[in-house]
Image (tube, rainbow, N blue to C red):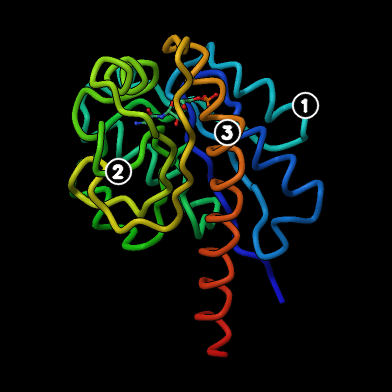
């Protein structure tokens, strides 16, 4: 039975991409295969991680495309040409339009570093999410993997994992712990769940 082809969209360090690669190596992603990594930033270290793992890479820059629409068309062309079944946003710091998200219903997933619906939506990304959680004074935070629709961080939740906040946490220490204890676990697990669903639909089982 052929595996679902995964395209991973990245912008930065790519530790979540690494978690997917490590899961694949460990046999924990049996229904999927990471087939392409696309960055919207030529300096993203995620590109090096992909190359080290022998995964094809591409860079698509919005400034070269001229508009958000042209940028998304370039992404879609690349994803479609490579036969990508599942798009994983792994630290992809760009909001995608309704035209893009509606083209892939239940076929785009995103990892977000909080327990949605807390600390999510426009402006909540990366370290800012952890700054906001600490400023609010919540005692528990975590990570969420969800389907992507036209509402930023508003699609159906697939998996969540809670992480306790410690008294002396800084945004940086909290970010690292949320990644290690939550994101790097639930992202590969959710990717496997959706890939299995894709394969099942394909074979009509
Ligand atoms: C991760 O914490 C991810 O959850 C977050 O950016 C970081 C990327 O790290 N994504 C968002 O905030 C999206 N709203 P990585 O490049 O090392 O995976």
Q: Residues within 10 Å of mark 2 (few under 14, many from 20)?
A: some
**Res 124 label:** none
Indicate whether 167 appears above or below 113. above
The earlier-in-sequence mark between 3 and 2 is: 3
Nearer to the camera, 182 or 156: 182
Circles 1 and 3 in contact, beta carbons < 8 Å: no
Residue located at (55% from left, 51% from top): 82
The earlier-in-sequence mark between 2 and 1 is: 1
Quarter-of-image position of residue 126? top left
Quarter-of-image position of residue 102? bottom left
The image shows residue 5 at horizontal and vertical percentages of 59, 57
The image shows residue 128 at horizontal and vertical percentages of 31, 16
The image shows residue 61 at horizontal and vertical percentages of 38, 21
Residue located at (37% from left, 29% from top): 139
Q: Which residue is mark 2?
A: 116
Q: Cβ(mark 3) to ligand 1 < 8 Å?
A: yes
Q: Which residue is mark 1?
A: 52
Residue 82 horizontal side relative to residue 119, left or right: right
Residue located at (50% from left, 19% from top): 12
Ligand 1 shows up in the quarter that is top left
Q: Secondary structure at mark 3?
A: helix
Indicate whether 181 appears above or below 200. above
Q: Cβ(mark 1) to ligand 1 < 8 Å?
A: no
In the rendered view of the protein, which quadrant contains the C terminus? Answer: bottom right
Q: Which residue is mark 3?
A: 16
Nearer to the camera, 141 or 58: 141
């Amino acid at each position: 039975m052929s595996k679902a082809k995964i395209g991973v969209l990245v912008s930065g360090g790519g530790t979540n991409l690494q978690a997917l690669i490590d899961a694949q190596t460990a046999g924990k992603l049996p229904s999927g295969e990471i087939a392409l990594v696309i960055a919207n930033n030529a300096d993203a270290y995620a590109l090096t991680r992909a190359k080290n793992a022998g995964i094809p890479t591409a860079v698509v820059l919005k400034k070269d495309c001229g508009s958000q629409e042209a940028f998304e068309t370039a992404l879609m062309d690349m994803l479609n040409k490579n036969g990508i079944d599942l798009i994983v946003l792994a630290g992809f710091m760009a909001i995608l339009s309704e035209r893009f998200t509606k083209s892939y219903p239940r076929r785009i997933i995103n990892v977000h570093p909080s327990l949605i619906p807390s600390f999510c939506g426009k402006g909540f990304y990366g370290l800012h999410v952890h700054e906001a959680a600490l400023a609010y004074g919540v005692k528990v935070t975590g990570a969420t993997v969800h389907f992507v629709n036209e509402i930023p961080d508003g699609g159906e939740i697939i998996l969540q994992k809670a992480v306790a906040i410690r008294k002396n946490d800084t945004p940086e220490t909290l970010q690292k712990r949320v990644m290690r204890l939550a994101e790097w676990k639930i992202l590969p697990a959710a990717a496997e769940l959706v890939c299995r669903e894709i394969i099942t639909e394909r074979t009509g089982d």
